[in-house]
Image (spheres, grey):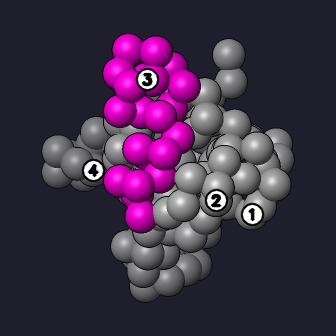
């Protein structure tokens, strides 16, 4: 199974949103296309086009609203849409060389090693 944050094409985020929404709709009718679109401030027609990959992924705010409404991690959904959140962008832009080197080195690491680094930083063990 592919990791939800790793995509090969821009339409993948729409497909992922549709699959998640339809799975939730099986248990809860409030996850219909119309209701999700309404809660997220977009038209059902637009959401349908996004889900079918007919339009480029929505902007950051819309993707974040969709992710939260569907119970998904906004950062993962943003990444699937080829975007990063404004707060992460600001952190990277504050130290572009350091973050570029860090990210390039982490690219070669297994997920378990990256997770260990995240935990160490979060817990102040550095």
Query: In the image, residue 42 lies at what x, y percent?
Result: 50, 63
Quarter of the picture holding the N terminus = top right
Mark 4 vs 3, N-terminal side: 3
Rendered view: 100 above or below 53: below
Mark 1 vs 4, N-terminal side: 1
In the image: residue 81, left or right of residue 26? right
How far apart are the two marked residues, 4 and 2, measured between alpha carbons? 40 Å
Between tags 3 and 2, which lies in front?
A: 2
Q: Which mark is residue 56?
A: 1
Say which of 10 and 112 sits in front: 10
The answer to the question of whether label 1 and label 4 lie on touching residues, with beta carbons closer than 8 A, is no
The answer to the question of whether label 4 and label 2 lie on touching residues, with beta carbons closer than 8 A, is no
Give the secondary structure at mark 3.
helix
How far apart are the two marked residues, 1 and 4, measured between alpha carbons? 35 Å
Give the secondary structure at mark 1.
loop
Between tags 3 and 1, which lies in front?
A: 3
In the image: residue 103, left or right of residue 29? right
Between tags 1 and 4, which lies in front?
A: 1
Residue under numbered circle 4 = 121
How far apart are the two marked residues, 1 and 2, measured between alpha carbons? 11 Å
From where the camera sits, is residue 38 visible? Answer: yes
Location of residue 41 (image quadrant):
bottom left
Mark 3 vs 2, N-terminal side: 3
Judged by its main secondary structure, the magenta piece is helix
The answer to the question of whether label 3 and label 1 lie on touching residues, with beta carbons closer than 8 A, is no
Residue under numbered circle 3 = 24
Q: Residues within 10 Å of mark 2 (few under 14, many from 20)?
A: some
Instruction: Report the span colored magenta.
Output: 21-41
The structure residue drawn at horizontal position 38% and vertical position 25%, both measured from the top left corner, is 29
The structure residue drawn at horizontal position 72% and vertical position 53%, both measured from the top left corner, is 49
Query: In the image, residue 118 lies at what x, y percent?
Result: 35, 44
In the image: residue 18, left or right of residue 89? right
């Amino acid at each position: 199974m592919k990791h939800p944050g790793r995509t090969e094409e821009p339409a993948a985020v729409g497909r992922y949103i549709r699959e998640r929404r339809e799975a939730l709709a099986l248990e809860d009718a409030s996850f219909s296309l119309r209701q999700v679109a309404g809660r997220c401030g977009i038209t059902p027609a637009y959401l349908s086009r996004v889900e079918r990959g007919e339009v480029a992924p929505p902007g950051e705010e819309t993707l974040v609203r969709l992710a939260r409404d569907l119970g998904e991690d906004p950062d993962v959904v943003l990444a699937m849409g080829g975007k990063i959140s404004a707060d992460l962008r600001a952190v990277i832009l504050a130290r572009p060389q350091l973050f570029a080197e860090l990210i390039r080195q982490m690219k070669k690491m297994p997920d378990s090693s990256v997770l260990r680094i995240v935990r160490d930083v979060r817990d102040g063990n550095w």
